[in-house]
Image (cartoon, rainbow, N blue to C red):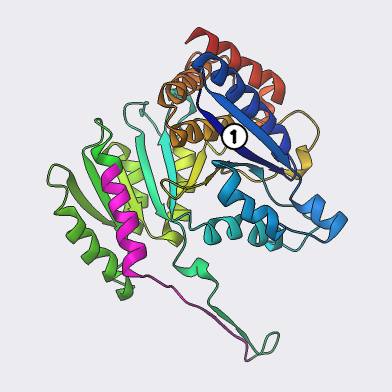
Amino acid sequence: MAEHRIAVVGGDGIGPEVAREGVRCLRALAEIGGFSLRFEDLPYGSEHYLETGEFLPDDVFESFKTDFGAIYLGAIGDPRVEPGLVERQIIARIRFDLDLFVNYRPINLFAEHLCPLKDRGPEDIDMVVIRENTEDAYTGLGGIFKKGTPDEVAIAEMIYTRKGVERVVRYAFETASRTPRFKRVTLVDKANAIRAQDIWTRTFAEVATEFPDIETDHAYVDAACMWMIKNPDAFDVMVVPNLFGDIVTDLGAMIQGGMGIAASGNLHPGRVSMFEPIHGSAPKYKGQNRANPLAAIAAGQLMLDHFGEHDAAARLEGAIRRVLSERRLPSLDARSGFGTDRIGDLVLEAIEEE
């Protein structure tokens, strides 16, 4: 029996609650599928930092590399802590120091009534955004000079390497080639205005020659945002630099129904990777059993695919689709009237029906 070890970092706010429901669904799928999942709960987040002054100990971080196949994250962020501090020390550290160079963001509309776009259905919104995850303006290179004075200067460097660009572009083409319904890879950049991004244009063209059966397209990021609203069916796989990918994927989340269903995988193929919902920690709902856990549950589906448990992943996706398309859950926000645990129950019931 295959066994997969998972480090669960519930984190802050609603994070532990939504992660709990994801774990419930994953346990049920493991029992049905005949494989084993071993979960280890870890306390790291803002609360732990406020109590101990500790972020993510080095020995725990090293154990991610050797003892676990995946990290399952709930949410990080607390208004009592400087904005971005804990996020940088935990999420960014995991992404950068584990070299999780792919941010994998599926944008799937499961039910037409969830889409804010007129006359668009699930057949129109079915794409994957492959966002580069370790370079660009997020490297932190730069700084502030003469802070707080009239002469203050702030500088941030966008960094792109051939290795970093090529590996994520190739992953995008590989995603299209192994997914029968995807025929096209679209590069999204702003190389006309940010000339350093010409490295993306040239690398994309070179890698494309290795995949002659895959169509290619190109869009500047401002036009891509427009087309995602006007013609979302034009996209299959999109590959995007880090900063623009952060923006484009939130737009994608809204056309699929909102943050309440959007999940992501932070991947290094063949190595430990991290999976999380893309919503925040929503501290005002902490402990109230009101948060929608579907995004966290969907992140579990991506984790199952990472483990190679594809049948279980497909079963979980089907269950989520059934809950939404049959309107068993009236809405994706906290006003649905359904508690966090009740939504988990709905998915578990649908899993049994698949």
Q: Nearer the viewer, residue 302 or 37?
A: 37
Q: Examine the rendered structure and indicate whether residue 52 appears above or below residue 157.
A: above
Is residue 165 on the magenta stretch?
Answer: yes
Q: Examine the rendered structure and indicate whether residue 352 appears above or below residue 307.
A: above
Q: SS of the residue at dot 1?
A: helix
Q: Nearer the viewer, residue 331 or 13?
A: 13
Q: Image check: 91 left or right of 203?
A: right
Q: Examine the rendered structure and indicate whether residue 141 appears above or below residue 208.
A: below
Q: Nearer the viewer, residue 276 or 68?
A: 68
Range of residues picked out in magenta? 151-174
Q: Residue furthest right?
A: 51
Q: Quadrant of residue 9?
A: top right
Residue name at image x 52 percent, y 22 percent: 35
Could you say where residue 4 lies in the image, as x and y percent from the top left?
55, 33
Q: Image check: 271 left or right of 28?
A: left
- According to the picture, the residue beneath numbered tag 1 turns out to be 296
Label 1 amino acid? Ala
Number of marks drawn: 1
Is residue 168 on the magenta stretch?
Answer: yes
Could you say where residue 344 lies in the image, as x and y percent from the top left?
64, 21
